[in-house]
Amino acid sequence: MEFSTTLILAGLILALLWIFNVKNKTNRRLPPGPTALPLIGNLLQIDKKAPFKSFVKFSETYGPVMTVYLGWQRTVVLVGYDAVKEALVDQADDFTGRAPTPFLHNPNKKYGIGSSNGERWRQLRRFTLTTLRDFGMGRKGMEEWIQEESEHMRAHMLKLKGSPFDPTFLLSCTVSNVICCLVFSQRFSYEDKQFLRLLTILSHIGKLNSSPVGQMYNLFPKLMDHLPGPHHKVFAEYEEVRKFIKMKIQEHKDTLDPSSPRDYIDSFLIRINQEKEISTTEFHYDNLVSTIMTLFLAGTQTTSSTLRFALSVLIKYPKIQETMQQEIDSVTGKGRCPSMEDRKSLPFSLAVIHEMQRFLDLVPLSLPHYTLNDISFRGYTIPKDTVIIPLLHSVLKEEKQWATPRSFNPQHFLDNNGSFKKNPAFMPFSAGKRNCVGESLARMELFIFIVSLLQDFTFSCAGGPDSINLIPEYSSFLNVPCRYHIMATPR
C-alpha cells in the first residue's frame, strides 16, 4: 500500500514537472529568469521580509527584464529606470492592465477604479481625475482645505505641551480628513470614535496586506479562504468600512441637489442619473462604493505613513530640520500658513520632502500591472495574463540615477546654485497611465503639512537622533516606517 502511494505521488510530481516544462517551452520567448519549481515557483528563493531585494539580486544574473513565478503566477519584473520608463511611459498602452490582487480586489469584486481594467477603468479614472480637479485638487479650494486641516493638527499638538506621543493616529486623522472633505464634504473630530474605528481598520488592512499572510492570500486565495487566520477578521472589518460608505451615499441621495454638487459622491450620483438608460455605463452603485473605498484606503495610509517617516527624518537629522526652519522663517514667517506658491522660494525644504519620499520608497513593488493581451517588449513576448512588477525600489535606489542612493541626501534635488532640480527617476507615484490618481493631492498635503509643522514646532524624541531607525518596520507591499513616541516642542 505504501509503495503504491509513493508511486502515485512520484507520478504526480513527474506529471507536474512535465506540464511545467511544456509550459516553459511554449513561452520560450519569455524573458529569462531563475529556474522555478512546480506549484510554488520561485517562492523559496525570495526573501519574504523584503521581496524587492531578491528581485534586484536576480537582475544581476538575468538582466533588467526577467521572469519569476510567484506560486504558479507567471510574473515579469522590470528593474531599473530605463526598463520601467520604457514599459510604463513609452509603451503605456500595453501596460495599462492592473493585476488582480486578491486581498484588495476580492472585497471589491472587480468594481471601482482600483480593481478594474478596460473601459470600466478608463471611464472611472477620467471621471475621478476631472471631479477631483473640479473640487480643488491642484487648485485653490483644495489648498485651503489642507491649510485648514493643518491648523487643526497643529492645535492638537499644542495641547500636548511637548510631552511624548505616538503621531500615527493624529497624522492618519489629518490626512483622512482631507479625503473626507473631497468625498463626503465633511471633516471629523480627532476624537470621533467612529472615525477612529475606521482608521484602525484601514491600518489593519494595510498591515495585513504587507504581512506573510497577506502575501499568501494574494498567491493562493482559494486555499486561504478555507484556512483559519487573521485575514477573515480583516475581511469582516472591510465590510464595516463599506457599510459606513453606503450610509454616507444614502445620506447624499436623500439631500442631493443636482444643480449644486457638494463633493465626489454627489457628482457620481448625478452621473448615475444621467446615464441610467445607457446599457454600457460604468456609473452605477457598486462602482461608486468600491471607488470611494479605494480613495479612502489609498489616500489615507500612504500619505500618513510618509508624514510619519518625515518626522522621523527631522529627528534623525536635526541640522536638516534647523536649516528648513531657517528657510521657512525667512519666507513665510510664523504668521501665515504656507501655500503651494511658496515652493519656488523654499528650494531646500522642497528638496528634503522629495528626498523623504525617495528614501522611504513607500511602495517598492508598485501596484502590479497585468498584460491584457500578448505584448512585445525588448525582443521578448510577454503572454496575456502575465503579472508585471515595475520595481519602483530599483528606480528610486538606482546608482546610475542618484549620487548616494543608500544615503539620505537632499542634494539629490538641488543644483550647484542651491535651486531645486527635478530628476526623472523620482517615481514614488509610479508613472504612465496608471500612476497614482491622487498624486497632485499627496504632493500638496506633504508640502503644506510638513512646512506648517516646522513653522510651529521642533521635533525630537527622548532617545535622541541615534535612537531613530529609518529602516522600515516591515516591508512587502509597503515599506512601513517604524513607530516612535516623539515630542513636538512649540517654537
Image (cartoon, grey):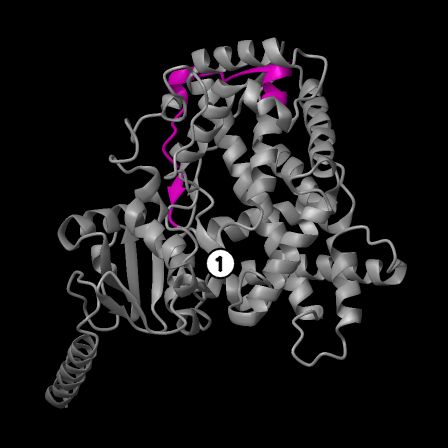
Mark 1 falls on what kind of element? Answer: helix
* Residue 127 in the figure: left or right of residue 355: right
Name the image quarter holding residue 488: top right
* Residue 418 in the figure: left or right of residue 54: right
Residue drawn 19% across the image and 52% down it: 58
Name the image quarter holding residue 259: bottom right
The x, y position of residue 308, in whole percent, is: 52, 31
The x, y position of residue 95, in whole percent, is: 40, 62
* Residue 488 in the figure: left or right of residue 413: right
Indicate whether 253 appears above or below 1. above
Quick one: 195 or 381, which is closer to the camera?
381
Quarter of the image where the N terminus is located: bottom left
Name the image quarter holding residue 334: top right
The x, y position of residue 83, in whole percent, is: 29, 51
Q: Is residue 64 magenta?
A: no
Q: How many marks?
A: 1
Task: Point out the stretch of residues depicted in magenta.
Answer: 451-476
Q: What amino acid type should be assigned to the residue bearing mark 1?
A: Pro
The x, y position of residue 399, in whole percent, is: 25, 34
Q: Is residue 452 magenta?
A: yes
Residue bearing the label numbered 1: 230
Quarter of the image where the C terminus is located: top right
Quick one: 366 or 18, which is closer to the camera?
366
| Residue 165 is at least partly visible in this image | no
Quick one: 69 or 345, which is closer to the camera?
345
Residue drawn 19% across the image and 47% down it: 57
For label 1, the crowd category at 10 Å Cα-Cα, with few meaning under 14, some 14 to 19 and many 20 or more, is: few
Indicate whether 293 appears above or below 446. below
| Residue 394 is at least partly visible in this image | yes
* Residue 18 in the figure: left or right of residue 475: left
Residue drawn 21% across the image and 68% down it: 30
